[in-house]
């Protein structure tokens, strides 16, 4: 019994559960983020070793975190647990181009694919291996050892323009991606593609009991990684334990909901200050990441003295995906403030100015997101503008300065964020600026 009368045994237990519930959200964020995207595929009657894809440019119904609605998305979800090594075939870059990355269920990148990846645009058969795989690797494959069974690939089929013919061509090219077990490589089955274009594909983060249900699915399916073994007892106290059903009583459920809500508030406070280091002087634009995060993810946390769980948790609370080599095929800048340092407000309009000769070979794209969910703004006819003219009335490639008005929308929450994506860089990014229009 505690000597402090305020801290009874029951109170200490309650405080421990809520405290650990907060940390479980931050630690488990990338895996839950990944699982929610897979569960959205399941809702469309899809499954592992199949491909979710969008048969046209995505609308707001793509409720993943900060997606780019100006390219064709394909997301193969792999699972090696029952079938063994899985083959992901990426087509040669003739008549199309894929920019993408293969990741495990923690969204740790295994390798990039396409012209900016290992195959250098020649196409290739990437072989995703189960944990501790000891079998022989056949000739002609690019082996990718993984510490986990599950994972996914984010692949973008890049459009030449927004014409109907070019959109259809990009979709057809993307559907040349194949996924199948190595055991069936002699006669691969037809790849199953699940079209998500006209369906709500909701992978926004739920800060309540649903978060822990998703985390439990990961714990049940995946091996414990050595770097994470300290979480075994932490999660056990929340009712998440490998081999056992997650069935918290009403009191524990209430504490978990409280913990998730507190974690949400903590992440939001960190998000507000995450972009304090500008990409260039006197600007609001910054890399959408935190110090040390990319090095850890891209090296599979090779440094034994560094494990950026806080930065990782924050990043995957507002985004998904991590390139193995950021800057080779794509680059990103983000801002949540106007040039005066005020948060974006859905009741106002803003002018985005991009100087001439933006250093990209393919295109740049600017997208506005809902600050509350970090997804596309619901019920908006469009959320982005870009230089390839992918959508009617948008900008076309020129050497002129681009300026566009982002009108305020009633559906926009109190604040939003603005993301600029660039593909196939040709030189160091030039400056961008967002000017308050009114």
Image: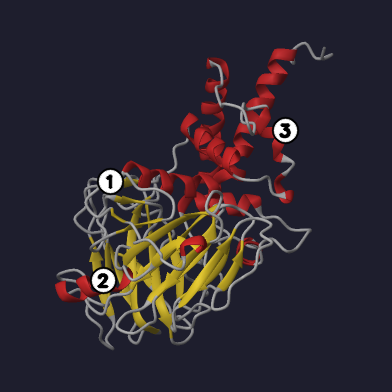
Q: Earlier in the sequence, mark 3 or mark 2?
A: 2
Q: Residue at x 62, y 44 (%)?
A: 27
Residue that mark 2 sits on = 172
Residue that mark 3 sits on = 233
| Residue 335 horizontal side relative to residue 133, left or right | left
Residue 257 placed where, x, y %?
51, 27
Q: Which mark is residue 200?
A: 1
Residue 80 makes an appearance in the image: yes
Give 421 or 135, whichever is nearer the viewer: 135
Residue 278 makes an appearance in the image: no
Quadrant the N terminus occupies: top right
Q: Secondary structure at mark 2?
A: helix
Give 264 or 349, whichever is nearer the viewer: 264
Q: CA distance from mark 1 to mark 3?
A: 36 Å
| Residue 19 horizontal side relative to residue 404, left or right | right
Q: CA distance from mark 3 to mark 2?
A: 48 Å
Dot 3 and dot 2 residues touching (CB under 8 Å): no
Dot 1 and dot 3 residues touching (CB under 8 Å): no
Callout 1: few (<14), some (14-19), or many (20+) C-alpha neighbours within 10 Å?
Answer: some
Please identify the quarter of the rendering in which residue 156 is found: bottom left
The mark lying in front, picked from 3 and 2, is 2
| Image vertical order of residue 50 relative to residue 232, above or below | below
Residue 13 placed where, x, y %?
70, 20
Q: Earlier in the sequence, mark 1 or mark 3?
A: 1
């Amino acid at each position: 019994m505690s000597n402090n009368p305020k801290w009874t045994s029951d109170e200490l237990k309650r405080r421990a559960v809520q405290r650990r519930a907060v940390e479980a959200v931050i630690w488990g964020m990338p895996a839950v983020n990944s699982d929610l995207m897979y569960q959205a595929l399941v809702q469309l009657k899809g499954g592992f070793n199949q491909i979710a894809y969008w048969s046209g440019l995505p609308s707001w119904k793509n409720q993943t975190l900060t997606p780019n609605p100006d390219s064709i998305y394909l997301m193969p979800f792999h699972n090696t647990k029952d079938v063994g090594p899985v083959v992901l075939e990426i087509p040669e870059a003739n008549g199309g181009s894929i920019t993408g990355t293969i990741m495990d269920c923690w969204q740790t990148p295994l390798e990039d694919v396409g012209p900016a990846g290992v195959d250098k645009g020649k196409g290739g058969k990437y072989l995703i291996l189960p944990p501790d795989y000891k079998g022989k690797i056949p000739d002609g494959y690019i082996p990718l050892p993984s510490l986990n069974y599950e994972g996914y690939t984010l692949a973008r089929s890049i459009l030449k323009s927004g014409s109907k013919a070019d959109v259809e061509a990009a979709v057809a090219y993307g559907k040349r991606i194949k996924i199948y077990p190595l055991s069936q490589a002699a006669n691969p089955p037809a790849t199953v593609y699940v079209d998500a274009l006209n369906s709500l594909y909701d992978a926004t983060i739920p800060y309540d009991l649903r978060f822990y249900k998703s985390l439990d699915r990961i714990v049940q399916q995946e091996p414990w990684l050595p770097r994470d073994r300290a979480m075994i007892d932490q999660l056990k106290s929340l009712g998440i334990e490998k081999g056992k059903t997650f069935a918290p009583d009403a009191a524990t459920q209430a504490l978990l909901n409280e913990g998730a809500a507190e974690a949400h508030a903590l992440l939001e406070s960190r998000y507000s200050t995450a972009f304090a280091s500008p990409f260039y002087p006197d600007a609001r634009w910054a890399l959408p990441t935190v110090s040390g995060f990319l090095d850890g993810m891209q090296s599979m946390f090779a440094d034994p003295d560094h494990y950026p769980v806080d930065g990782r948790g924050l990043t995957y609370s507002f985004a998904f995906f991590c390139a193995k080599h950021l800057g080779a095929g794509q680059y990103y800048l983000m801002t949540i403030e106007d040039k005066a340092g005020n948060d974006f407000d859905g009741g106002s309009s803003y002018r985005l100015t991009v100087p001439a000769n933006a250093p990209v070979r393919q295109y740049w794209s600017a997208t506005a997101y809902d600050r509350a969910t970090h997804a596309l703004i619901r019920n908006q006819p469009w959320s982005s503008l870009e230089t390839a003219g992918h959508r009617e009335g948008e900008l076309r490639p020129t050497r002129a300065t681009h300026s566009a008005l982002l009108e305020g929308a009633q559906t926009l929450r109190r604040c939003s964020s603005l993301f600029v994506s660039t593909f196939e860089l040709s030189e160091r990014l030039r400056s961008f600026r967002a000017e308050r229009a009114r």
